[in-house]
Image: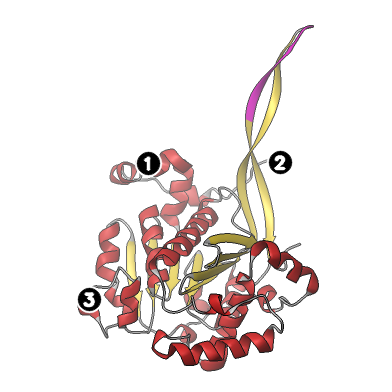
Amino acid sequence: MVVDMDTSETAVELTEAENELYDRQIRLWGLESQKRLRTAKILIAGLCGLGAEITKNIILSGVNSVKLLDDKDVTEEDFCSQFLVPRESLNTNRAEASLTRARALNPMVDISADREPLKEKTSEFFGQFDVVVVNGATNEELLRIDTICRDLGVKFIATDVWGTFGFYFASLQKHSYVEDVINHKVVANSEKKKKYETVSIPTQRDVDYPGYSAWLDFDVTEPSYLRKLKRNGPGVLLLSVLQKFRTTHKRDPSYKTREADLELLRGIRDELLPNSILGDEALGLIFAQISPAVAVVGGVVAQEVIKVVTKLEAPHRNLFVFDPETCAGYVEAIGAK
């Protein structure tokens, strides 16, 4: 297939200082990819521990700008994993408190904060960005934002971490990327033996990614899917329970009310998933945001954003789950054909 990628993103020229700073990255993924990153504008909504981890990795990659959006204040719980906010920032806005340390990571990236509630943002706001990453939002809000982003052609990623469990869902619409296809070319052909040469051919792929509604419409109790759980574990079931808890109680489970919230979680599980393989042990692993899980999920989300922007390699399609019981991540194709 002929590679026909948009060249407007690579028209920008890197300065001498940028070439020096991003030298290792340029050698890793190429100058054109770094130029694409240099033009990218990213929104990260929700500056909890997960948001901080994603922010760090995106800033270090060398994008054009990062907008940090959060209307919540720093709490004691944030200090479990939110390394961008200093101790003295307790009870101040999380996005604004993250600015100083975020800017110190890479002075060449334009980083700003916005403390308005996510629910007040309109299509005009989201249209400023190439990729929108949202964590800590309800399903209703995630669906609203994804619908706006799909209308605007903006890539959207929903993500979250509860305790040692995490996920992300990528709604990338029709995404084009380039991958190297390895072929073996005959360079010499004698009567006794053929001589081959390995040839790498850049090939463009076009893949459709369903919207966030595909996850909301997904039936986790469907018999054919339940059979897969024996291999992958109950992570997707746990995600359903946690999102239902957030929708019903307008908050997440808290370690301060651990026993009462465990009872509520068990009730939701038994209502949604009768005779489920989702045990009580998994429910006990979802309080606060634990640094190791934040590092894993945040690292994967940031890497997927980089894939989307650089158009190198295939982003995961489309639901990633990090399971606390197995300490492993896996990908499910939800609603994808």
Q: Measuring 62% from the left and 88% from the top, which residue is drawn there? A: 268
Q: Secondary structure at mark 2?
A: loop
Which tag is nearer the camera, tag 3 or tag 2?
Answer: 3
> Is 245 on the left or on the right of 194, as rendered?
left
Residue holding disc 1: 24
**The disc label shown at residue 330, or none:** none
Which tag is nearer the camera, tag 1 or tag 3?
Answer: 3
Q: Is residue 13 visible?
A: yes
- Where residue 147 sits: x, y (%)? 62, 77
> Is 189 on the left or on the right of 296, as rendered?
right
Which tag is nearer the camera, tag 1 or tag 2?
Answer: 1
Q: Is residue 128 above or below residue 138?
A: above
Q: Earlier in the sequence, mark 1 or mark 3?
A: 1
| Kind of residue sitting beneath label 3 | Arg
Work out how far the residue at label 3 is from the one at label 2, CA to CA, in angstroms.
Answer: 54 Å
Work out how far the residue at label 1 is from the one at label 2, CA to CA, in angstroms.
Answer: 30 Å
Q: Quadrant of the N terminus?
A: top right
Visual colour scheme: secondary structure
Q: Measuring 76% from the left and 7% from the top, which residue is drawn there? A: 190
Does 72 lie within the magenta span? no
Residue holding disc 2: 1
Q: Measuring 28% from the left and 73% from the top, which residue is drawn there? A: 85
Q: Residue furthest top?
A: 191
| Kind of residue sitting beneath label 2 | Met
Q: Earlier in the sequence, mark 1 or mark 2?
A: 2
Please report contact status of discs 1 and 2: CB closer than 8 Å, yes or no: no
Magenta span covers which residues?
191-199
